[in-house]
Every structure is written in structure tokens, then in C-alpha cells.
Image (spheres, rainbow, N blue to C red):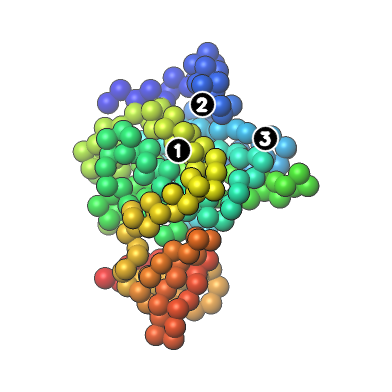
Amino acid sequence: MNDRLGLLADPAVRGALSRELGWPIEHHAAIPSTQERGRALADAGTSRALVVADEQSAGHGRHGRPWQAPRGSSLLASWVFRPLVADPASFALLAGVAVARALASLGVADAQVKWPNDVQLRGHKVAGVLADAVTAEDGGALVLGIGVNVHQTREQLTELRDIATSLAAEGLAVDRLALLARLCIELERIASSATERRAALEEWRARSATLGREVEVRPPTGAPLRGIARAVADDGALVVDTASGPRHVLAGEVSLVR
Ligand code: BTN
């Protein structure tokens, strides 16, 4: 597969694409974490930035879990949105729809979303989204990080084979540069208006791998709860019908029971 992401190392290419996409791009062959770099830029007052890396030495996901990807295997990127997007809490959820739409535009149909921020192919995680709000007197910023497993072979997925996949492992050849460009377009679209966000939330519901299923939810604090995932509310919360009534879950990890 002819992957063109490495072209971003060329300042002329990077400059041209930055202008075309409307995102000043920083490209790193290797960096601890695009998300931490994005946060540092946001803390320093940067208004918009897109940080992309071919390899991360300290990539992380939600709840501080490590996010590991062999060099050149994944799309690893963080966007700094300043001013802060509207409804930042549900933006991370809707970013999953942006990933699914970007994949669809490149011929990868049927991506599903799993609450809160995962994108799946055939029941296995192919992408994750991480959102960090940075507070500041000017209203602050949102740093949105996305990792997409693109070129990992089945062998490289060994440890995670039961829960994760990659586009290549599903027999799908995708160029990371094209995926990055499509993601910029789809994220902008969702950030652009309340109407677009409502449409994206409807699409989240239609693409959901969670709704209607029996789930166990482990909130960041407190006891896990079990029930049927009935709905996703307009604020992005998962509504779970438990034996003791409906519960509105704003954060946590979900596993499908059956
Ligand atoms: C998750 O599923 O827990 C979210 C994973 C987010 C990973 C991406 S990779 C690019 C960016 N840099 C990081 O360190 N994390 C995010």
C-alpha cells in the first residue's frame, strides 16, 4: 500500500495541505504523545493546530491507558479547537461518527460506534477518541486525539486480537494521509452547527453497536451497573435500563454482556 503520510515531513507539502485543510499541521516522526503536544500548544494559547506523528513513545487512551502502535502503523493525530467547540462533552462521541464517515468516504462501509468513543469494525475496535478540555480565561480549548489502527498486521495485533483490529487486518488498504484529510473535513462539519451535531447524533444512534444490547457499565467511581442500553441522550449520556430503573451514565467503560 502506498501510504503518503510521510510526505508531511516535507515543509512544502505540509504548508500546502495546512492551507487547503485550514489546519496548521505539525508533523513528528516520533513524539511522546500528539495529545500531550496538543495540550501544550493549547496551554500556550494556540488557536488551531493539528499534531500528527508516525510513532508515539507514550501514547495514551482514556483513563490513562497506554495506546501502543508500531511505527508507521496508525493514524495518530490531535486537533486543537480554539475557540472551544459547542457541547464539548458530546463532541468526543460525535467524533466517532466523523471517523466512521471518513472511513466510509474511503470505501470502508459499516463502521460502528461503541459508547462512549470507540469505532469498531465487525465488533473489534479500530479507532479510539480522546478529548481533553483545556481551561483558560478566553474560554479555553478542546484537544481531540484520534488513533486509527490502519496497517497493523494480524500478528502485530496478537495481544489485543480479541478486542482490536486494523483496517489492514480486515483486508482494507487505506492511505493515512487521505484518512487524515477526510477526518479534518468531517470534524469541521460536526463542529460547524447545531444542525450538523443533531444529524451526527442521529447517525451515532444508527451506527451504534451498543444500543439495545445488555451492557455492564463501569463508571469512573462507584459500583458497576448492568442493564439494557436503551438510548443516547442529547448530552451524549448513555441511558441504561437497570433493574432499579433508568440510569443516565455520563462517563465510564461499557462491555457488551451478550
Ligand atoms: C481510547 O480509545 O482510549 C482513546 C485512544 C486515543 C489515542 C490517540 S492516538 C493520538 C492521540 N495521542 C495520544 O496519546 N492519544 C491519542
Instruction: Name, please, the residue furthest toward the top.
Output: 12
Q: Between marks 3 and 1, how big is the CA–CA gap?
A: 19 Å
Residue count near mark 3 (Cα–Cα under 10 Å), binned few <14, some 14–19, many ≥20: some
Q: Is residue 240 depicted above or below 202 in this figure?
A: below
Indicate the amino acid at tag 2. Leu
Q: Can you tell which of label 3 and label 1 is closer to the viewer?
A: 1
Residue count near mark 2 (Cα–Cα under 10 Å), binned few <14, some 14–19, many ≥20: some
Q: Quadrant of residue 212?
A: bottom left
Left or right: where does residue 209 sit relative to residue 245?
left
Earlier residue among tags 3 and 2:
2
Q: Is residue 210 depicted above or below 120 in this figure?
A: below
Residue under circle 1?
186
Q: Quadrant of residue 89?
A: bottom right
Q: Position of residue 94 (x, y in %)?
A: 47, 50
Q: Position of residue 104 (x, y in %)?
A: 31, 39
Element class at badge 1: helix
Q: Between marks 3 and 2, how big is the CA–CA gap?
A: 15 Å
Disc on res. 47: 3
Left or right: where does residue 255 sit relative to residue 63?
left
Q: Residue at x 41, y 27 (%)?
A: 177
Q: Between marks 2 and 1, how big is the CA–CA gap?
A: 11 Å
Element class at badge 2: helix
Query: Is ligand 1 less than 8 Å from the beta carbon at label 2?
Result: no
Q: Residue at x 45, y 66 (%)?
A: 238
Earlier residue among tags 2 and 1:
2
Indicate the amino acid at tag 1. Glu
Indicate the quadrant containing the C terminus: top left, top right, bottom left or bottom right: bottom left
Disc on res. 7: none
Residue under circle 2?
21
Indicate the amino acid at tag 3. Ser
